[in-house]
Amino acid sequence: MTRAGFTALDDELKTLKSVERPAVIRAIAEARELGDLSENAEYHSAREKQSFIEGRIKELEAILSLAEVIDPTKLSGPIKFGATITIVDEDSDEEKTYQIVGETEADIEAGKLNVRSPLARALIGKDEGDSVEVRTPGGQRSYEVVSVRYI
């Protein structure tokens, strides 16, 4: 995982523990004061939210405890994890830029490409000027690697 991905997950964990968890505990306490818990929608809603928060906290703690943080600026050479690559679709001439990142920080809309995606797997090991064929859900696509940077 990149440093930015690790920091984002760590910030989310801190927010859940310091803000969200205490807020839901207060909401549960307030809902209990309203009386009969069997028909108390506020209580059940707060308990459901608490369950989600606790599950997410456990998930984030597990991810962060096993995370290996990689600094892309210390890398070079052919495409590998952490590379920021610019590719051009050989059919449409559409140019796109992606950074290859871990699953937990992947966000295609933000240009963060999951290392396990078909496109990333096809690009790994390639260099500037290379062409790749990728089988996608939309069919076979051809891309040319325009640039490889480690920033």
Image (cartoon, helix red, strand yellow):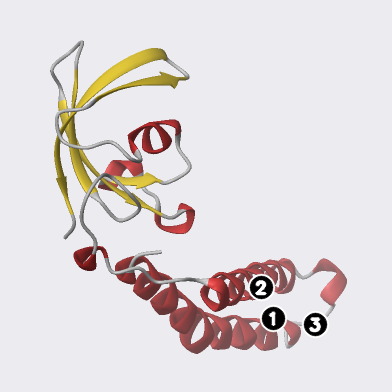
Q: Badge 3 is on which residue?
A: 35
Measured in 3D between alpha carbons, the distance from the residue under mark 3 to the one under mark 2, in whole angstroms, is 15 Å
The image quarter in which residue 141 lies: top left
Q: Which mark is residue 46?
A: 2
User: Which sits earlier in the primary sequence, circle 1 or circle 2?
Assistant: 1
Residue 104 position in % (x across, y down): 47, 57
Does residue 99 sit above or below 89 in this rendering?
A: below
Measured in 3D between alpha carbons, the distance from the residue under mark 1 to the one under mark 3, in whole angstroms, is 8 Å
The N terminus: image quadrant: bottom left
Contact between labelled residues 2 and 1, with CB atoms less than 8 Å apart: yes
Depth check, front residue: 93 or 39: 93
Residue that appears at 48% across and 42% down:
116
Residue 55 position in % (x across, y down): 66, 70
Kindly state the secondary structure of the residue where label 2 is placed. helix
Does residue 25 sit above or below 108 in this rendering?
A: below
User: Which sits earlier in the primary sequence, circle 3 or circle 2?
Assistant: 3
Q: Which mark is residue 23?
A: none
Residue that appears at 60% across and 80% down:
24
The image quarter in which residue 40 lies: bottom right
Residue type for callout 2: Ala
Residue that appears at 25% across and 63% down:
72
Kindly state the secondary structure of the residue where label 1 is placed. helix
Residue 63 position in % (x across, y down): 56, 69
Residue 48 position in % (x across, y down): 70, 67
Q: Badge 1 is on which residue?
A: 31
